Image (cartoon, rainbow, N blue to C red):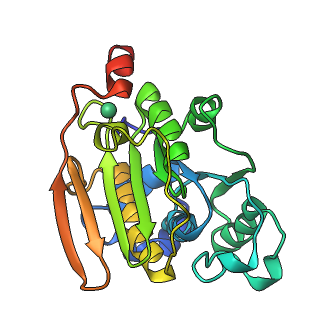
Amino acid sequence: MKEPPVKMLTDSEKERYARQIMIPRIGEEGQRRLKAATVFIAGLGGLGSISAQYMAAAGVGDLVITDRDRVSLSNLNRQILHRTADLDWSKTESARKKLVALNPECRIRPVATTITADNAATLIAGADLVLDATDNMATRLHLNRAAVSRGIPFIYGGIDGFDGMVSSFIPGETGCLACVFTGRSGKDRPVPGVLGPTAGLIASIQSLEAIKYITGAGEMLKGRLLCIQGLDMSFREIHVEPNPDCPVCKELHHEQ
Ligand SMILES: [Zn+2]
């Protein structure tokens, strides 16, 4: 990640984040990087419920949270940022309340809108990375295209029943989501069943990837699509390479 502006930590922040600051690969430098970071979270459902909380708890300084929907009863088996009392609230407002309560040090910017091909690049402008917590491939591909055009990393997560997939796409270093899911052209299957823990597992991995990217710690899931099958608890990796015929990379490669 590019060198962030220096943001000093207050005594209260040093105490709040003490248990992660003591991790050698994070330290105060990593914590300052988290404080200076802006993360765009696309979706506040099963995945976003988890990653938004981990980003706020970890001390990401600026969180842009987006969702177009209101909380409904059938969300609550997995979207655990929302409560029964939040039914019919907008998910952005429901999430904002919880995240501010969790960590008032974070700036939370709710954006209640539908992500489209036209607005995706504007929405993610200024973000250091995009956490994909959407529930459909069409929106993911809009965001992916915008992320490639702006040179912003895109951390993909998808869930279906007991299964999930996750990978990190870094412009200039890896292919993009459209390199892997070529031919999907935004068409989705019917809405799948979802278990809360599956969403939690994938969103936790995405959150770890985000923290690693921001702090520079470790190796990311680059060029690797991690596929998790919850029923037999098997984890396997599919090697993914840039696709020379990817329409997004082809068109936007020279703009980077
Ligand atoms: Zn591509």
- Residue in view at x 41 percent, y 70 percent: 204
Question: Between 233 and 123, which is closer to the camera in this rendering?
Answer: 233
Question: Between 91 and 234, which is closer to the camera in this rendering?
Answer: 234
Q: Quadrant of the C terminus?
A: top left
Question: Between 193 and 75, which is closer to the camera in this rendering?
Answer: 193
- Residue in view at x 41 percent, y 44 percent: 154
**Vertical arrangement, residue 44 with respect to residue 200, above or below:** above
Q: Is residue 150 left or right of residue 171?
A: right
Question: Is any part of residue 145 visible from this angle?
Answer: yes
Q: Is residue 47 left or right of residue 158?
A: right
Instruction: Write down the quadrant of residue 34 in the picture.
Output: bottom left
- Residue in view at x 73 percent, y 46 percent: 113
Locate residue 153, reporting x and y percent. Answer: 39, 41
Instruction: Write down the quadrant of residue 218 in the picture.
Output: bottom left
Instruction: Write down the quadrant of residue 191 in the picture.
Output: bottom right
Locate residue 215, reporting x and y percent. Answer: 34, 53
Question: In what quadrant does ligand 1 lie?
Answer: top left
Q: Is residue 54 left or right of residue 169?
A: right
Locate residue 130, reporting x and y percent. Answer: 48, 46
